[in-house]
Image (tube, helix red, strand yellow):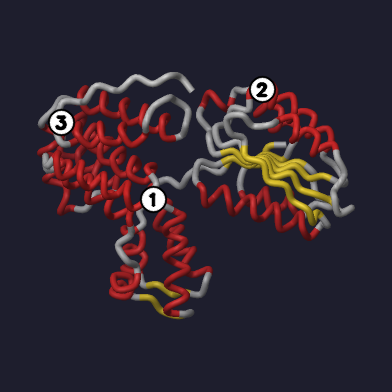
Amino acid sequence: MQLKNPADLQRALAQTPLPPAWFLVSEDPLLLQEACDRVLQQARGAGYLEREIHTVEPGFDWAALEQSGASMSLFASRKIIDLRIPTGRPGDTGTRVLENLLQQAGEDTLLLVRCSNWEPAIRKLKWVRLLQKQAHALVLWPLKPHEFLPWVEQRMRACGLQPEAAAVEALAMRTEGNLLACDQEIRKLHLFLGEGPVYSHQIDELVADSARFDAFRLVEVAMQGQARRAVEILAHIRAEGLAPHIVHWALNQRIQVLADLALAGADAAARQRVFDQHRIWRSQQAMLERLARKHKPGRWYALLQESLACERILKGRQAGDGWLELERLVLALADQPLPKRPKFEPV
């Protein structure tokens, strides 16, 4: 059964008895985690006290999972099988095991399958169609740019904060597009300030420039043509332990803006629409316009394709070294010739 939105999920969770099979998908980690948490909370209330967590990785033991699904709980209580398939590709063996687990799910066993890859090719696979038909399935789409600011305000007010508009904008700018980082900062604000008004100067004081801003600084330095310095910053970011997908997000966002500006050309209204769509601050617009004019649209869209390949590598869907791919993007953004991609054996 396919659910359309979180409200449908909440109604399904209120059913008695609790449905025994769930399939939740989102490429946003916070949206996925919170939806799964709601299922788990309801399941515990329904007596599913034991929980097994399985993450599908190369070499995953499907036979052990199948045996676990067929066995009784060690504590004579209902149990949850929390199965995580981040790549979205369980293969033929995994598909067969999932089919068996769906048949076994019932009064004693609840199956929760979560997936963070929702590429068009994944949606057509047999195991996905199977779960969408036989489990309660919900896809949680990432927020669109215009949805982020209202989400931030709602999130702040939900925990008792009463932010002025400028405070909401300041927090949104500092955590732009990253729901998980934003949620963590809101929790920190509540810890320090308690319930009540929140002003923009408090955001400046309490919401520290996170490692995400190191990623933004990397992008700015690269766009200024400082290739060597940009590579040094990238090495520092890696040493600090920042997740590479955050660096990729910052790079990809700017490359997309440059591609759109190059396509807009001399049309001032079209360029302004690009700035509005991507929420580019006025102070950055002139520099981005100058950089976009340095190359034809084809150069920027070719770089977007390189960025897409980098994303696949970072997510383990293509062989390669994600940090080397990020370095290639940084050098290309710094107007250096795109280094040749090293060869890797297929995964």
Q: Report crowding for label 2: few under 14, some 14 to 19, many 20 or more residues within 10 A (C-alpha).
A: some
Secondary structure at numbered mark 2: helix
The x, y position of residue 333, in whole percent, is 19, 35
Instruction: Classify the position of the N terminus by image quarter.
Output: top right
Q: Nearer the viewer, residue 276 or 211?
A: 211
Say which label, 1 or 3, has the lower sequence index: 1
Give the numbered dot on residue 177.
1
Q: CA distance from mark 1 to mark 2?
A: 32 Å
Q: CA distance from mark 1 to mark 3?
A: 27 Å
Residue type (three-letter) at the residue carrying disc 1: Gly
**Is residue 138 shown to the viewer in this render?**
no
* Residue at 46% across, 62% down: 184
Q: Quadrant of residue 302?
A: top left
Q: Nearer the viewer, residue 137 or 225?
A: 225
Q: CA distance from mark 3 to mark 2?
A: 44 Å
Q: Which residue is mark 3?
A: 265
